Amino acid sequence: MTSATTMTTALEAVHRERLMRLAREVSFEAGARLFEEGRRADRFWIVRSGTVALDLHVPGRRPAVIETLGHGELVGWAWHFPPYIWHLGAEATSPVRAYEFDAGSVRGMGAEDPAFGRAIAVWVGRVVAQRLHASRVRLLDLYAPYGSGGPV
């Protein structure tokens, strides 16, 4: 996937290399929950292969899938902003291989190196903006009387 929010396009090589020093390879089976709404956000992932669905708890209904993420995309952004609590849930929709990062270590590295910290903050900010837009569109499609349909 080519997107302004994937790690390879959002971060300069020097910052990608620095971040990847903290990476740990992990895998998830299809159906595994990576995180749940309201729980502590102490790590994040970059998808290597497979897909992860971001979902929102809807009382009395199945969780609403907001967006599906794939190769190179950041899974989780709440680790970057206090109080470090997940705002959505995430589930592997296929077998997933990913790089996992300890959030505290990445925040610490950003505090030590302001250029790195700024690069990470800008990347995460772009992801947040894109995810908020996707959430709005998806929720309008699900619950608005006429869907997201565009301007009237």
Image (cartoon, rainbow, N blue to C red):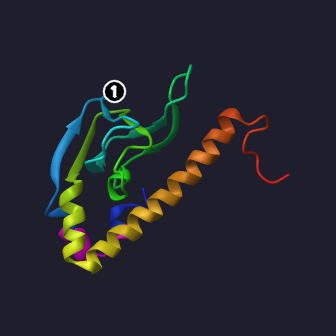
What residue sits 63% from the left and 39% below the top?
139
Residue extending farthest to the bottom is: 115
Give the residue at mark 1. 31
Residue at the far right in the pictured view? 152
Give percent across and percent down for residue 148: 72, 45
Q: Decide: is 125 above or below 52.
A: below
Horizontal arrangement in the rendering, residue 29 relative to residue 52 (left or right): left
Q: Is residue 143 left or right of residue 16?
A: right
- Coordinates of residue 11 in the picture (x, y in percent): 33, 71
Which of the two residues, 2 or 121, is positioned nearer the viewer here?
A: 121
- Quadrant of the image occupied by residue 118: bottom left
Q: Quadrant of the N terminus?
A: bottom left
Which region is colored magenta?
9-18
**In the image, residue 13 lies in the stretch drawn in magenta:** yes
**In this picture, residue 73 sits left or right of residue 129:** left
Residue 3 in view here: no
Above or below, 100 against 50 in this view is below
Provide residue 57's location: percent of width, then percent of height.
50, 31
Q: Is residue 61 above or below residue 69?
A: above
